[in-house]
Amino acid sequence: MKLHGLAVAAIFAAGCAFAQTTEIHNDIPASFTPPKQQAETVIKPEWDYIKRVEMVPMRDGTKLYTVIVIPKGAKNVPIILTRTPYNAASRAAAARTPIATGNAASPERGAGKQDSAHMIDELGLADEVFVNAGWIRVYQDVRGKYGSEGPYLMTPPQVGPYNATGADDTMDAYDTIDWLVKHVPESNGRVGMLGSSYEGYTVQMALLNPHPALKVALPESPMTDGWMGDDWFHYGAFRETMLDYIIGQTNQRGGAYRAPKHISEDQYTTFLHYGASGDYARANGMDQLPYWKTVESHPAYDGFWQAQALDKISIEKPLTVPTMWLQGLWDQEDMWGAIHSYRATEPKDKNNSMNYLVMGPWFHSQVNREGRALGPFVWDGDTTQYFRREIMMPFFSQYLVDDAPKANTPPVLIYNTSANHWDRFDKWPLSCDNGCEHSAKPIYLTANGTLSWDAPKGSEQYTAYTSDPAKPVPYLPRPVSEDHWRTWLVTDQRFVDGRPDVLTFVTEPLKEPLRLSGTPVVNLMASTSGTDSDFAVKLIDVYPENVSDELKGYELPLSLDIFRARYRKSFEKPEAFKPNEPELVKFDLPQVNHTFERGHRIMVQVQSTLFPLYDRNPQTFVPNIFDAKPEDYKKAEQRIWHQPGKASFIQLPVVK
């Protein structure tokens, strides 16, 4: 997921049982005086649209840069709003109002974009359905970014102990919608919101206190809980490659400064050279960036992160806006937000009429691009186009257009990644722990490297491997670069299968198909010779040898994640291991809707590093891994236990 920002609002962290008092400033340092920008309307006779650029006032007087694109002749049509930290002028492509960039005043545009006479060419692929319908499209810079005034805070929580600025994205969305329905006469007074990633977060924030004119919402892979499983951490393991994002997002109001990769083109070599994440940050000037210092001072799931956990916050909010939560099944950035928000709010949707879930065979934000394939896997047509035209547009129209027909929207729409078609369900997940037709079923990790449906009865105690922080397991084949970032979650895992620091457990070829629909749950009985450890677990579909050359023997990861085991008992209070004493490490893997076909095999891999995507655990318990010293990083023998009563297993969401 330029001008320096006017730094002035301080945020005093207080009042949470799990947090220490912390001071948080504007996340863009130094000072900024916003230029006086006047509203501008761009009209050309040959264009089929009008573009208005407005500085929309918020309740505190701050003005936000807003681009309004209106089809010529539009009357009584809805507004589709996206609030973004990624340059509204570029998203709407041809805005004419100057945006100061530090050296000159000029608009920033999308790559290769030119002014177009046609609205459908001017906006992106994702807006095609809205343009064809003759709707109004609005993009707005969040406060403190690009053309908008005010201080910038990265995905700020609601106003409170961790946000003392007096404003948040809930208020700004409300004030923006209020202004739009009063000042855009071509509209019918109804607004829909959508956006992906950070923009999905702004949609979700708007839902916490929605304006009455907000009639429908589509948060796509929203940044919902940055510690549990979205951008910054996964179960406490820090996503080290996000350091460059923090630099680019918070060093200036706009632009794209990135940290230099002067050590090697291989990210593996670069991050290994620097050591701990804190060392990388300091070497690249991040000690000047308030947001990085905030992240560094909150390694555990304390009040700072809990105050931003929108899935948990939404439990307390009434359902008033029909909302469709959207997630990619192989989303490499924000895998947590949509599914957990859907599940948090679903119990309140008594009539199955307000809360919807869509999960497609996509990487992060692929819904806004073409969706015919992912890596070597080719789907049944353009899955994203189908969703936008056949699912999203009727859903939006139902709530935004007078006399629109009721949409045939399934409560749950999830792509079946093996049968290669969409499944429509009334609920999700299909399987459950008990009390329903489809129940979760444990598959055990055995001492001989196999997977078994039967609990262990033998005397073999454990399988061991040595994890060496000096030689971490890569998450991609080296050299690790951004070239394969979008598809790394479907990378053939044979590139690590056989490493001595990766345990592999596998079944015999299946005699009958096995369908999974739901949440795989990891239950590792694990120990370490050190005092701290991470455990990464992958659920894999192993293709047989009698398929096409590209997929022959392919080890397709269906679901994988990493868990920082110092949080095995409490996410708020880390605890060291007692060396070689087995303890339960339990966590959910991402959702699956997949059938292991006859002749395929089920595989589980266990390892302790996914580098450099995630930072290395030194395997010595230290107060803050961000600042671990070189001498803290030590080899450790990791044991996965198989004894009766201490058996390791994956709880699979089997559907009969």
Image (spheres, rainbow, N blue to C red):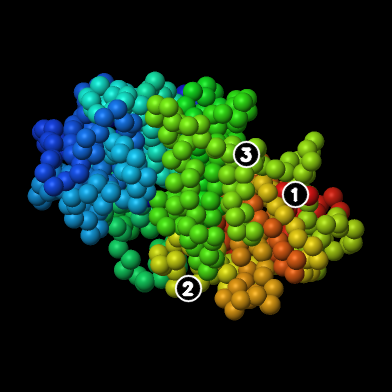
Circle 2 residues within 10 Å: few <14, some 14–19, many ≥20: few
Where residue 61 sits in the image (x, y, percent)? Answer: 21, 23
At label 1, the amino acid type is Val
How far separated are the C-alphas under marks 1 and 3? 32 Å
Q: Which mark is residue 164?
A: none
Q: Which residue is drawn at 39% across and 20% down?
A: 212
Q: Which mark is residue 655?
A: 1
Look at the image and tell me whether residue 63 can be seen.
yes
Q: Is mark 3 on a helix, strand or loop?
A: loop
Looking at the picture, tell me which residue is in the foreground, 509 or 616. 509
Look at the image and tell me whether residue 81 can be seen.
no
Circle 3 residues within 10 Å: few <14, some 14–19, many ≥20: few
Q: Are marks 1 and 2 in contact (CB under 8 Å)?
A: no
How far separated are the C-alphas under marks 1 and 2? 37 Å
Looking at the picture, tell me which residue is in the foreground, 560 or 593. 593
At label 2, the amino acid type is Arg
Looking at the picture, tell me which residue is in the foreground, 534 or 656. 656
Where residue 32 sits in the image (x, y, percent)? Answer: 17, 38
Where residue 487 sits in the image (x, y, percent)? Answer: 48, 62
How far separated are the C-alphas under marks 3 and 2? 35 Å
Q: Give the labeled residue for mark 3.
A: 570
